[in-house]
Image (cartoon, rainbow, N blue to C red):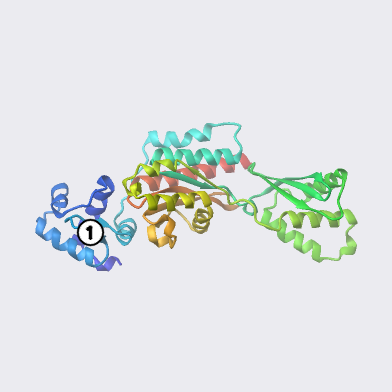
């Protein structure tokens, strides 16, 4: 894509994108020559703009002479032209505020991170809490609810808590459940949930005669408790900020976006995709193949522990967002969350 544009075309596209980000108004050739020292006449700029439009980088939203960037234009800008800014000390201090909040559970800290992302970017902050299979096991407890039903409480090393109700037949007494919990806590602590699931499969495949009845029940309960993925919950903070953007005066576009916020499954899919990639990831408008976020961009980064990536956070806003300022905010927040979780898991 980069070979299609010469230096002059690149400079004019960069000017159009940055001016449109700042004004939300279609950009004309005279505005480009007036605001930028390009050494080109308005007529020359108009000709280049016509070429950029023909190649799909910009488009005219109506009959005016102004142009706005397309998703292709934003992508070229982000990948090729963008100069990412640096956070100033005040911004870093605001992001670090949640780090100094003591006594919060992991979920509460992650929600605070979403609030900080929203406050600094003026868009919506999104944070996906870790899927439990990506965390390290610390403790499990089985609590008898009613005949045949048991509440399973998982606690990860970082303090993440997940609950799940399972059924067992024949039923076990609370004393038997405590024996099962004690055995599992002694043998599984320090393993990742993924490792535990593999261990249970291996152990159950071995000679069952070597296990007593209670041990067999412990393995069966563990397998039942871990048979489905839990987690993947998404916090969305500051969604109302998006309503202040001019793009969302379109009622239908606003409804589609907020339906996506309500369902959250779409955001989980996007955040899952970026969880396995390194560095900051940027999804722009129609590139995501989800019509619900058309006209929006999602900037994400993964946070991790010493055992690897465990979750994703980011900012969602209009495609006309200030990428140079939002990218370092997302990157710094993800790195800070990683530090917090690592310290608290020790």
Task: Please state, as top left, top right, bottom left or bottom right, where the C terminus lies in the image.
Answer: top right
Q: Nearer the viewer, residue 202 or 147?
A: 147
- Side (left or right) of 195 relative to 80: right
Instruction: Work out whether residue 299 can be spotted.
Output: no
User: At 42% from the left edge and 59% from the top edge, which residue is drawn?
Assistant: 291
Query: For residue 295, what is the image quadrant?
Result: bottom left
- Side (left or right) of 70 relative to 220: left
Residue 237 x, y percent position in the rendering = 48, 41
Residue 141 x, y percent position in the rendering = 76, 44
User: At 22% from the left edge and 63% from the top edge, which residue is drawn?
Assistant: 52
Query: For residue 91, what is the image quadrant?
Result: top left
Query: For residue 222, what is the image quadrant?
Result: bottom right
Q: Which residue is mark 1?
A: 60
Residue 128 x, y percent position in the rendering = 54, 49
For mark 1, give the secondary structure: loop
With respect to residue 194, does 326 lie above or below?
above
């Amino acid at each position: 894509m980069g070979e299609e544009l010469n230096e002059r075309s690149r400079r004019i596209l960069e000017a159009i994108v940055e001016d449109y980000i700042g004004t939300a108004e279609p950009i004309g050739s005279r505005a480009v020559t007036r605001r930028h020292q390009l050494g080109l006449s308005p007529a020359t700029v108009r000709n280049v703009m016509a070429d950029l439009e023909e190649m799909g980088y910009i488009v005219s939203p109506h009959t005016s002479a102004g142009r706005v960037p397309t998703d292709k234009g934003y992508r070229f800008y982000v990948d090729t032209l963008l100069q990412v800014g640096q956070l100033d000390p005040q911004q870093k201090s605001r992001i670090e505020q949640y780090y100094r909040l003591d006594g919060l559970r992991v979920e509460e800290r992650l929600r605070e991170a979403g609030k900080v992302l929203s406050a600094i970017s003026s868009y919506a902050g999104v944070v996906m809490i870790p899927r439990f299979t990506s965390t390290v096991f610390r403790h499990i407890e089985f609590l008898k609810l009613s005949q045949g039903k048991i509440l399973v409480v998982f606690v990860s090393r970082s303090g993440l808590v997940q609950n799940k109700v399972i059924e067992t037949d024949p039923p076990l007494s609370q004393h038997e459940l405590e024996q099962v919990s004690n055995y599992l806590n002694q043998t599984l602590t320090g393993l990742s949930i993924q490792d535990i699931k593999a261990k249970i499969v291996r152990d159950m495949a071995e000679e069952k005669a070597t296990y007593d009845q209670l041990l067999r029940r412990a393995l069966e309960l563990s397998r039942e408790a871990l048979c489905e993925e839990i987690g993947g919950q998404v916090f969305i903070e500051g969604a109302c900020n998006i309503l202040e953007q001019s793009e969302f005066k379109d009622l239908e576009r606003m409804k589609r976006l907020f339906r996506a916020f309500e369902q959250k499954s779409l955001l989980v899919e996007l955040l899952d995709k970026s969880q396995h990639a390194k560095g900051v990831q940027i999804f722009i408008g129609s590139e995501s193949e989800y019509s619900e976020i058309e006209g929006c961009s999602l900037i994400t980064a993964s946070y991790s522990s010493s055992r690897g990536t465990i979750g994703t956070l980011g900012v969602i806003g209009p495609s006309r967002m200030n990428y140079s300022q939002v990218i370092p905010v997302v990157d710094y927040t993800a790195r800070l969350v990683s530090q917090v979780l690592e310290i608290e898991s020790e």
